[in-house]
Image (cartoon, rainbow, N blue to C red):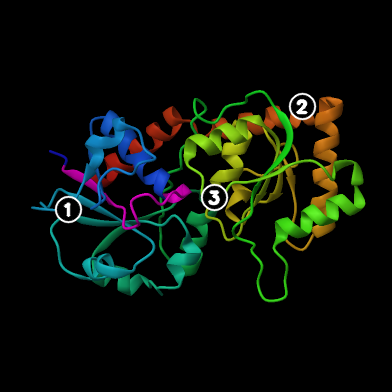
Amino acid sequence: MAGRIIFLNCFPRDLVSGGIKTVYRHAFLLRQAGFQAQVLQSEGLPSWLGQEMLPLVCRDVKDLAEEDMVVFPEVLDGWYADMIRQPMAGKKIIFCQNPYYFFTYRPSVEKLRDWGVTQVLAPGMEAAHLIQRVLGLEAVPVTSPVVDGAVFRPRQKKLQILCAEWKWPHQGGIPAYVCLFRDMLSLKYPQFSNVPWIPLKKRGEAEVAALMGESAVCLALGRMEALGITALEAMAAGCLVVGYHGGGGREYATPQNGFWHSPEDMEGIVDSLAMALEGYVSGSSALLKMVEQGWCTARAYAPERVSAQIQQVYGCLCG
């Protein structure tokens, strides 16, 4: 008989991030499929989650059996850093949702073996291959994040730019990227100087989904991403996406579904923002096609597709 799958959510209860959302979504889909999936959150159900998630939440880990599975995050801090190094019943899995964070803990193959980690998972193929190349692991199965089209969907659009900017803040003498882009857009394309810019930071999922649904353009500035779920959610919500794929987004970023640039191409970003805004105003058929391609891209991460994928992966791990 298959045991429990316990995801360790070792972050503050009401912190919202793509990785935390993915943990709860995976546990929920696995529970729907008949697995005994739980999420450890000692403070209880996060306020931003619906009550349907309540049965998933456990406040501690007790009475582990050999058939149980404990899924650690890649951020090995605090008590769970000690926990992963200690002998325990059950299998130890690491769901590495950001390899760049993971590498800072210097997790060699020898260390993983000594800790008793039997498998490392990744949210996308780019991340999986990166982990394999850097650490020398043979296989890193992919368990993708969920982009729910019932939540992230197009609504009545407005001429506004939604910006996911927190990974490129003001640092030393370097200006915050969003502030610079806004200033450059106003200088080079003054006709768009009054277009509203809406920041995404510190908003719950329902509010983010609503803002994406009503925004014509999303400036998604990914950085050191394992996949980059913000851009995918924006695509599902019918936005024209401009920005950076952050590395992991190479899995889905194409010239057909967005305006993708390198972080050094500051003026190119500004030109693409202007093109996207002008295309929205004029009803450009080429940009409508880009929106459609973006929506199709996001469909690859729909709940039913991810459910089938994670059932296969965890079914093998439980076997």
Drawn side of residue 181 relative to residue 203, left or right: right
Quadrant placement of the C terminus: top left
**Residue 41 spot, x, y in % from top left:** 26, 50
Residue 15 colored in magenta in the image: yes
Drawn side of residue 274 relative to residue 86, left or right: right
Residue 319 in sight in this render: no
Instruction: Write the residue at 80% across / 38% down.
Output: 276
Q: Nearer the viewer, residue 135 or 24?
A: 24
Residue tagged 1? 60
Quadrant placement of the N terminus: top left
Disc 2 is placed on an element classified as helix
Residue tagged 2? 288
**Residue 275 spot, x, y in % from top left:** 85, 40
- Compute the Cα span from label 1 to label 2: 49 Å
Disc 1 is placed on an element classified as loop
* Dot label at residue 227: 3
Mark 3 residue crowding within 10 angstroms, few (<14) / some (14–19) / many (20+):
many
Q: Which residues are magenta?
A: 3-19
Q: Amino acid at mark 2?
A: Leu
Disc nearest the viewer among 3 and 2: 2
